[in-house]
Each structure stands twice: as C-alpha cells, then as structure tokens.
C-alpha cells in the first residue's frame, strides 16, 4: 500500500516541475533538493527526470523564453532570416539568455504549426507566419510591456478539404455534444467493442493496431482499476491534425474516451497533451467542466447505472519519444519517458501497473462518429480493408497547406492535385519516421491495406519494382504529408531528419542512440563530397542494425526515410560521391579560387 501511495504521489511530479519552471523560469538546485525530499527520491534520480525533457531548464531561461521551430518545413519559410532578426533585436545568439535575463532564445523541433511557418512559441504562446519584421516588432512590444496574450496568434485550423458528401465526412461535420454518447443506453460494453472491431478501426497515431482488439484485451484483464489515455503528444514532424481536431471538437474526443472507458470498464481517463499545445489546455479543461455539469462525465453518466468516468489533462514537457505508449506512461508516472521492454503490454500492466488503453486523438474521435452514423454507413466509405476517412497534415511546396479529411483509397496523384502541389519532386510521407515518395509512386493509392513500415525490406534495387510491390501508400504514423519541389536539397532535408533523431533518441538503447549519430556523420560526409560507395553500403548496414535492434518502434522506423530516399533518388547521392580514382567529382577549380580571384581583383582595382 505504501508503494502504491508513493507511486500515486509521484504522478504529480511533472505538474510540480511545470509550476516551478513557469514561475521562476528554471528549476534551481534548492528546488531540486526540496522536490526530491517531498517525493522521497534521490536528487540524482530527479536530475535524470528534469534533464530528460526539453522544456525544463536548470538555468534561467529568461522572462520571455522563445522557442523557434527549426524543423525542415520552417527552413523553407524564412527560418534563417527570422532567426537572425531575433538575434539582432535581442542581442544574443540562439541558445543563449540575455544578461538581464529578459529574453531566452532557443531552437526546438516541430511545434505542430507546419502549415503556418515560420513559427515560434514564446512562453508557450504561439506565433505564426513569422517574418524578420514581425519578429522585431514582437520583441519591441514585449520590451514596451505589451502582454503576450495580446501579441500572439491564434493558430488557424486550415481545414482545406472534407468529402463533398456530408454522409461521407466522419470528423469535420457538425458536432452536437452528447449525441453519440446517448446511444450507449442501447449498447452493452461487449456490444461497443464488437462495433469497433467490425468497423476495422485501427490506431491512427502510428502503430495501426486494431482498436477493437486492443479494447478487448484490456476488458479481459480483470483489475480493480483501469485507465484510458489519449495520446495527444503529436510530436511527429509535419503532423498537426490532432491539434485541429482538439481545437474544433474537444467534446468529440471526450466522448470517445468515455466510450472506451465504458467498453473496457475504466473509470479514469487522461489526455497526455504535448507541451507545445499548452494553449489548448484551457479549452480542453473548460470542455471537461461543461461535460461534468451536463452529466456527460462523472458518476452514472446519462443515467446509466455504474457508468462512471472522469478525465484530466497531463502536460508533457518536450520529448518525441513520449509518443511511444510505454514511454508516455512512464512520463505520466513522473519518470524519464523511456520505452519499456514488452514483457507486458499496457492493456495488461500499464499506468500504475493497471490495464490501460492508449489511443491517439484521431482514433478516439472516430468511435463516437461510427456509433452516431451507424456501422453500415461507415463501412461504405473508404476501402474494404480500411473503411472511413483519414486526416492528413499537409505542408511544404503547395498552395493549400492544412488539414485534409480524405476517403481512404484516393490516388496519390489526385491528392497532389487537390493540395495544388507545386512541382512535387520529393514527398516525405508519414513524417520523419515515414518514407520518401517520388513520381513513380503517383499512381499508388492512400490506403491502410499496405502496412509499409512493417513490410519494408529494402531488398529492391529498382524504385519502380518497389512501387509495384507496395501497391498502396501505407499510413504508419499520423499522416504527415510534406511536399518539396525539385529546387530543394534532398541531402539538407535528410541532415535535418538525422539530427532530429540524434536529439530525440531517449538514449536507452545503443543502436538508436549511436546508430543515428553515425548516420548523421555519414550524411555530412556525403554533403561534403568526401564519401564513396562504401559509405552508402555502411548506411544500409547500420540502418538494418538500428531497425532490428532498437527497443521501441520509434527507433526501428528512424531510418525509413533515409533508406527510401536512397532507393528513390540515387542520383542525389551518386553526384556527391568520390570517383573510382578518388577524384572529388564535386571539386570545382573556379569555386576553389574564387576568394583569391576576388582579392586580386580588389588589389588591382585599387591601383587603377
């Protein structure tokens, strides 16, 4: 009992750390001593927790802490110029704090605003579509005492498309609170699980595991307490559809969580919200309060005897790995967000050792819609194996970035027309853990029949053969869709991706931690035109080791985009390799002596 009480107490550790971080702008040595004593843990262990999360600082981060998004899409939209404008205006380089502790300026990876780049968070207030002039104006007004809430931007939802026929729209149609939940009066818990099974709904956060089967496993595990966790840690670069869903229909999410609780016998639910979405916390909590007042959450919901369910919001603190369900659970328990070995799955022993269902925002929002529209109608949408619709987050070189709700089965070329892609040359599908697509893929359909990340063997030497084998475009992650035109530098994109995985590896297993570091060095070598064919072979060998040996799914998929880029665009690598004679093909004599020629020209001009 004492151990359970201590474990329960520790679940509030992240809240305590956040309170101190936001109040003092850092967590001091004295703070750590007091916290360690309060939670009955060593200072060393507490230090390990604090240092694990990106947004907890051990030195003063400034009264105004600026986090500028440095991810790939941002770098297509004024990132360098905006960075320099901030640096010039506040007088420090990125990664530092001003001497008066007024401003701290840091870079961070994707903050879920890829459709509105360049973007930044200042004390977690969002700022979008930044330009150098806008950056300077923000700093000037902050110095003049303007409150952040009067300066920040309200991120646009940018819902660009949903099926023209309303009865084929699942997510972005009119929502009436409690409409779907009231239908539970006609369903037993087993009926709900059977409905979800028959709908063929699969996890929309990355794993693509059948939702109904997961719920069945949890229900079958007998325990005095069970939990439902909504994974709203939308950290995959280029993905932001969960942000839009929570902003548009927070009630739909709560209904989905309550239905999951009803089905498996859970009475408590938690929304694990990424820190980058702090500005959504208030709306979620207001909706929770409204649901409680209207009998849609709480005790004996809607008069159904024994249907008790409550929801709270737990804030993350900046860790990509917490998108993995066991790492997320560890974080909720006040620990480092490190994935565990799969001795037990969360549906057996999850949060606090109890059976736990972890589902993504989109997955949970789909359930009440299926119940509301009816199974027969839902199954008529999409494809046979993957009915319904899919949300895609679109950014990059296209005229219409934003969120798209498409019917499963749409051809890739038709989708490119829909978003008005400009010269689509490289397409990064499913985020940094996804795959690169090229023109040979344009006839493939966007469908879940092809679970790409599980079946990729990269044994094909011909991208067309690969494309034919993989007849569908698989959706293993959240549905990120980044478009790059032919003027973009593929190797620079890959360097950004490998740097991301180096920074975001939890570090617990050697293959992911060291392997991605080595791959990043290989990309640098290729970019400098110092590599040869053996370096490409080594990239494939190391990638295989990482894929086979990493502890969690995020590590196993970390090299997918690099391998598919090598397969689809071999010319981009070959042109940078040393020739058989070790002659550097990229060496240009004119470029090498350019500075010398300019100096000589200036000297000669001075004598004229």
Image (spheres, rainbow, N blue to C red):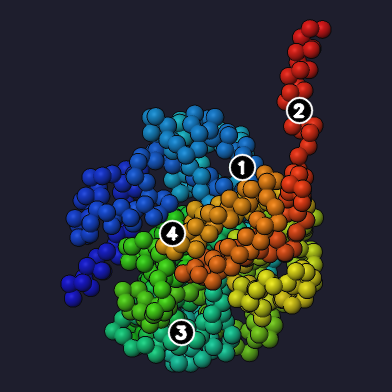
Mark earlier in primary sequence (1, 4): 1
In terms of image quadrants, where is residue 240? Answer: bottom right
From this viewpoint, which residue is outermost toward the front?
581
Mark 2: which secondary structure? helix
In three-dimensional space, the C-alpha distance between marks 3 and 2, rounded to whole angstroms, equals 66 Å
Query: Could you tell whether 423 is left or right of 475 in the image?
Result: right
What residue is pinned by disc 1? 79
In three-dimensional space, the C-alpha distance between marks 4 and 3, rounded to whole angstroms, equals 31 Å
Indicate which label's residue lies in the foreground, 3 or 2: 2
Mark 4: which secondary structure? loop
Instruction: Please provide percent x and percent y for residue 13.
Output: 29, 59
Instruction: Please provide percent x and percent y for residue 20.
Output: 30, 49
What residue is pinned by disc 2? 594
Mark earlier in primary sequence (3, 2): 3
Q: Circle 2: is it few (<14), some (14-19), or many (20+) Cα within 10 Å? A: few
Indicate which label's residue lies in the foreground, 4 or 3: 4
* Residue under the point 54% across and 66% down: 546
Decide: marks 1, 4 in contact (CB < 8 A)? no
Instruction: Please provide percent x and percent y for residue 381.
Output: 68, 82
Query: Could you tell whether 293 is left or right of 244 in the image?
Result: left
């Amino acid at each position: 009992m004492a151990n359970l009480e201590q474990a329960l107490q520790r679940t509030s550790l992240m809240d305590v750390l956040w309170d101190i971080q936001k109040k003092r702008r850092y967590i001091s040595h004295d703070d750590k001593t007091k916290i360690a004593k309060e939670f009955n843990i060593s200072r060393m262990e507490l230090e390990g927790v604090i240092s694990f999360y990106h947004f907890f600082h051990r030195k003063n981060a400034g009264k105004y802490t600026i986090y500028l998004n440095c991810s790939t899409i941002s770098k297509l939209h004024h990132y360098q110029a905006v960075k320099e404008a901030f640096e010039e205006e506040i007088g420090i380089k990125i990664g530092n704090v001003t001497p008066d502790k007024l401003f701290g300026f840091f870079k961070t990876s994707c903050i879920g605003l890829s459709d509105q780049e360049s973007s930044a968070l200042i004390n977690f207030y969002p700022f979008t579509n930044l330009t150098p002039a806008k950056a300077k104006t923000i700093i000037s007004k902050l110095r003049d005492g303007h409150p952040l809430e009067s300066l920040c931007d309200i991120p646009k939802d940018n819902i660009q498309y949903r099926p023209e026929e309303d009865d084929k729209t699942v997510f972005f149609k009119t929502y009436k609170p409690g409409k779907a939940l009231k239908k539970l009066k006609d369903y037993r818990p087993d009926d709900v699980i059977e409905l979800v099974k028959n709908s063929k709904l699969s996890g929309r956060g990355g794993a693509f595991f059948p939702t109904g089967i997961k719920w069945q496993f949890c229900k079958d595990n007998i325990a005095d307490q069970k939990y439902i966790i909504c994974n709203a840690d939308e950290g995959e670069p280029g993905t932001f559809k969960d942000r839009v869903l929570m902003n548009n229909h927070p009630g739909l999410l709560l209904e989905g969580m309550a239905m999951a609780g009803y089905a498996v016998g859970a009475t408590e639910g938690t929304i694990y919200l990424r820190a980058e979405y702090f500005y959504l916390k208030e709306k979620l909590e207001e909706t929770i309060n409204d649901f409680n007042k209207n009998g849609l959450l709480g005790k004996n919901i809607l008069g159904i005897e024994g249907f008790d369910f409550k929801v709270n919001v737990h804030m993350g603190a900046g860790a990509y790995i917490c998108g993995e369900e066991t790492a997320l659970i560890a974080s909720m328990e006040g620990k480092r967000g490190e994935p565990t070995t799969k001795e037990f799955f969360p549906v057996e022993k999850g949060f606090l050792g109890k059976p736990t269902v972890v589902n993504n925002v989109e997955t949970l929002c789909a359930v009440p819609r299926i119940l509301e529209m009816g199974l027969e109608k839902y199954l008529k949408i999409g494809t046979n194996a993957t009915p319904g619709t899919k949300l895609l987050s679109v950014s990059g070189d296209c005229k219409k970035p934003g969120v798209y709700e498409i019917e499963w089965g749409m051809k890739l070329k038709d989708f490119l027309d829909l978003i008005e892609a400009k010269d689509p040359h490289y397409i990064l599908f499913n985020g940094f853990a996804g795959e690169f697509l090229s023109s040979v893929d344009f006839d493939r359909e966007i469908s879940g029949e092809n679970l790409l990340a599980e079946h990729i063997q990269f044994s094909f030497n011909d991208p067309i053969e690969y494309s034919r084998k993989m007849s569908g475009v698989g959706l293993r992650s959240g549905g990120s869709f980044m478009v790059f035109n032919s003027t973009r530098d593929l190797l620079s994109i890959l360097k950004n991706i490998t740097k991301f995985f180096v920074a975001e590896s939890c570090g617990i297993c050697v293959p992911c931690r060291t392997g991605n570091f080595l791959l990043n060095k290989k990309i640098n070598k290729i970019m400098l035109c110092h590599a040869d064919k053996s370096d490409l072979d080594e990239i494939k060998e190391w990638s295989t080791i990482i894929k086979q040996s990493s502890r969690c799914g995020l590590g196993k998929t970390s090299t997918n985009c690099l391998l598919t880029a090598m397969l689809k665009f071999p010319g981009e690598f070959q042109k940078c390799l040393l020739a058989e004679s070790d002659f550097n093909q990229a060496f240009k004599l004119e470029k090498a002596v350019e500075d010398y020629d300019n100096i000589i020209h200036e000297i000669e001009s001075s004598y004229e």
